[in-house]
Image: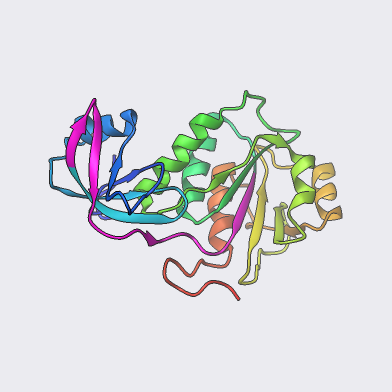
Amino acid sequence: MDQPGLCAVRRFVVEALAPESGQVRLDPATSHHLLVVCRHPRGAQLIVFDRGGLEADAELIDVEEGCAVLRLCSAPRSAAVRTPRHLVLGLPRGPALDHALRMAVELGITHLHPVLAARSVRRSDRADRWQRILEGAARQCGRADVPELRPLSPLDQVLPLLPDALACFVGVPGGPRLRPGPGPAALAIGPEGGFTPAEIQRALAVGWQPAGLGAWVLRTDTAVAAGLALLAPDPGPGAPGPS
């Protein structure tokens, strides 16, 4: 359900925005949500976005074989998050993971790296479900882009990949307060119980910096929200990107 006050106009994901055709066709699942769940009337305005940062105004003009056909009412415009933010997330239990994913989208991450850490809950790769959560959160919060979901990987495989291009911070109980600069950054948050001391040492050895998130023990989803809120704010769509 869309939240009142956040987006006055409903938003829907499309595979691509092709302004030369002047139309887009929604997939069956999205069409069902538009036509049956939302009961969206013909001619009423909506916004479509393509996961990559482009969005456009549109209106429903037809239904073909159960799929909604929309007319583009404006040229596609860029509304992507400009500052790269990576979240390395040790898999917690189901509800905490769902909450963490939604809050991460709302707080501007651009890349999500789900990882298996020593204390992670062992589960099968549910990338399709995680992708749906990311897209739904982007739709509700007004983003035109969807964070890039990287494959589920062991923590030690991901840690060395990021420090060369990003300021990287790993959540450490009692660590120094997170004080990032204005540029691209990454944050690593462990599962319930946090990262083990050995995992933290391996992160520090490849260039990650320790970062504390307060005096108390935080749940994984709370730590994600607290840590991402402390990262340098994104300038937002239309503002100059980082130099």
Residue 157, position as x, y percentages in the image:
78, 41
The residue shown at (42%, 70%) is 238
How is the rendered protein coloured?
Answer: rainbow
Pick the residue in front: 82 or 121. 82
In-image side of 186 versus 233 (left or right): right
Please determine whether, in this image, residue 34 is positioned above or below residue 78: above
State the residue in front, 126 or 72.
72
Residue 67 percent across, percent down from the top left: 26, 31
Is 77 covered by the magenta stretch?
A: yes
Residue at 15%, 48% (x, y): give it: 44
Residue 190 appears in the rendering: yes
Q: Quadrant of the N terminus?
A: top left
- Position of residue 214 measured from the top left corner of the image (x, y, whole percent): 63, 58
Choose top left, top right, bottom left or bottom right for residue 37. Answer: top left
In front: 37, or 170?
Answer: 37
Residue sitting at 48 percent across and 50 percent down? Answer: 105
Whole-percent x, y for residue 152 in the image = 66, 34
Q: Viewer-proximal residue, 216 or 134?
A: 134
Taking 156 as reference, is 161 above or below it?
Answer: below
Q: How many marks?
A: 0
The residue stretch that appears in magenta: 61-88
* Left-right relation of 206 to 178: right
Hey, which residue is sitting farthest front in the picture? 20
Q: Is residue 6 visible?
A: no
